[in-house]
Structure formats: structure tokens, C-alpha cells
Image (spheres, grey):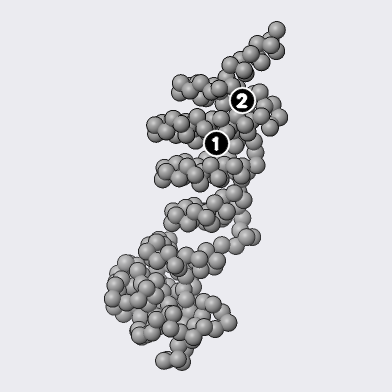
């Protein structure tokens, strides 16, 4: 039995290879289906492996990302009818569907124009939170930051997930997106803790000015919270732990002194 990479490298992946290009086909009412006048058949754009498997087994003509077929001489979308051998191999290897999906992701990375269709067909607002989280992480992997940010902001009450994405964003140097997502945190304590973390990471990377800016922003955030003094003290302590003295530190100290007297 072949593995998926062998399937896609096989010249028989399509029993019939259409010489047309996707953009030259006639549009239909369904934007992911176009009509080919050469063979008088509808051609179905397959932006997910599940779609490809379904349409291939039905004997339909498909359009798939060129990366999957490993045929650099072809246009970006390879058009044609999958061979029965391809359908059989994929059907027999359902246990390796994760490998199939991983292979598909490679093609999406090389052809970002496919991504809007992929997102539209793979994401459902009715998803459970854990499904949304996984999809957001997939989008982050493909650097689809706008859609990722939109979904991540809707999941603003799960501390573990929020910590995960903040760490990943920092690892790829996207502090701007991390700050944008943190601003949407609904739970104040999460927001303060996340901003402290971003400030510490900035300082660790030698970005002291950015760290100070984030600490000061965090102090502004804390002022609007219940128990603001507790949060302010935590922020100042965090800054002091790396040798940063913030402008209002002396004021806080005076306030605390007044309260104790």
C-alpha cells in the first residue's frame, strides 16, 4: 500500500487531466463549482481533503492545489478526474487521514489564494470552543493573522488557550497581534497577567522601551479595575523584578504609607 506522498507523486493521480485553467471555466451559481465547456462537466474546487475524497469517489472532476500533485509545470490549480487507484488508496488509508490533512496543509501554505475557501468551508460558528481553538491554532500556523485574531478574541475566557496563543505569538515575534488579542480578554486578571508576561518577554529580548510601554499600559488598565491597588502593586512588583522603576511607583508607595498610618 502506498503512503500519501507516493499517491500524490503518482502520475496517475488523475485518470484524465484537463488542459483548462480554473479562471477560464464558466462560473456557476456556486462559486466553488465551474463549468468546463471542453468536456461538458462541472469542476469542483476541493479546498479540504474531505471534499476531495467525496468528489473523487463520486467520479467528479476536481480542482486541487498544484502542490498536492507535485507537477510544477501545471497551473496552480490542477484540474481533472481522480483515478480509481487514487480513490482506493485514500479510502484504504482512513487511519492515516491526519497525514492526508497535513499534506493538504502544505499545499495551502504554498498557495494562499486557496485559504479563504478553506476557512469558509472548514469553520463553523456553531463549533464547540475546543474546535474553534484548534482551528485558530491552524490559522496561526499558516500566518492567517486577521482571521486568527478574530476567532481568538471570541475565546477570551479560556486562560490556558490564551496563554498558549500568547506564547506562540511571542515565539514568532508578533507582539502586535498578541497585544491586540490581550486587549480583548474579558477577565481583568487574565489581561493584567498577560500584559505583565508580554512586558517581561520584551525585556528578555532586550526591548526595554517596549517593556516599559507595556507596563505603563498595564497600569492604566489596572486603574479601571476593582481592587485596582492590588493590581497596580502586582504590576510594579513585576517591573521591579527586572530592574524597571515606573514613574508612579513612588506615588503608590506614598499611598500605601498613608493607608498604613
Is residue 130 visible in the rendered structure shown here?
A: no
> According to the image, label 1 marks what residue?
194
Give the residue at x 44% y 54%: 143
User: Where is residue 131 drawn, in percent x and y?
Assistant: 56, 55
Give the residue at x 39% y 71%: 65
Give the residue at x 70% y 7%: 261
User: Where is residue 34 drawn, in percent x and y?
Assistant: 49, 83
Nearer the observer, 137 or 200 = 200
Q: Is residue 128 above or below residue 230?
A: below
In the visual, does 55 lie left or right of 85? Answer: right
Q: Quadrant of the N terminus?
A: bottom left
Q: CA distance from mark 1 to mark 2?
A: 14 Å
> According to the image, label 2 marks what residue?
232
User: Where is residue 126 drawn, in percent x and y?
Assistant: 64, 60
Q: Is residue 29 above or below residue 215?
A: below
Nearer the observer, 239 or 248 = 248
Amino acid at each position: 500500500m502506498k503512503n500519501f506522498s507516493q499517491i500524490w507523486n503518482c502520475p496517475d493521480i488523475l485518470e484524465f487531466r484537463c488542459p483548462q485553467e480554473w479562471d477560464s471555466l464558466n462560473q456557476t451559481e456556486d462559486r466553488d463549482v465551474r463549468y468546463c465547456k471542453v468536456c461538458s462537466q462541472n469542476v469542483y474546487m476541493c479546498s479540504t481533503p474531505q471534499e476531495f475524497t467525496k468528489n473523487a469517489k463520486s467520479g467528479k472532476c476536481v480542482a486541487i492545489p498544484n502542490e498536492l500533485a507535485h507537477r510544477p509545470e501545471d497551473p496552480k490549480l490542477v484540474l481533472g478526474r481522480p483515478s480509481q487507484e487514487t480513490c482506493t488508496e485514500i479510502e484504504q488509508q482512513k487511519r492515516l487521514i491526519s497525514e492526508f490533512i497535513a499534506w493538504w496543509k502544505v499545499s495551502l501554505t504554498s498557495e494562499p489564494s486557496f485559504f479563504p475557501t478553506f476557512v469558509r468551508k472548514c469553520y463553523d460558528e456553531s463549533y464547540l470552543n475546543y474546535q474553534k481553538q484548534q482551528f485558530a491554532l491552524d490559522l496561526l500556523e499558516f500566518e492567517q493573522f486577521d482571521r486568527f485574531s478574530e476567532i481568538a478574541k471570541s475565546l477570551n475566557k479560556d486562560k490556558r488557550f490564551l496563554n498558549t496563543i500568547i506564547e506562540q505569538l511571542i515565539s514568532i515575534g508578533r507582539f502586535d497581534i498578541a497585544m491586540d488579542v490581550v486587549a480583548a480578554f474579558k477577565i481583568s486578571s487574565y489581561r493584567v497577567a498577560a500584559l505583565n508576561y508580554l512586558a517581561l518577554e520584551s525585556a528578555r529580548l532586550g526591548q526595554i522601551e517596549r517593556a516599559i510601554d507595556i507596563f505603563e499600559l498595564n497600569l492604566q488598565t489596572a486603574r479601571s479595575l476593582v481592587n485596582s491597588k492590588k493590581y497596580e502593586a502586582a504590576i510594579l512588583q513585576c517591573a521591579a523584578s527586572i530592574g524597571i522603576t515606573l514613574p508612579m511607583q513612588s506615588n503608590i508607595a506614598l499611598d500605601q504609607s498613608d493607608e498604613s498610618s
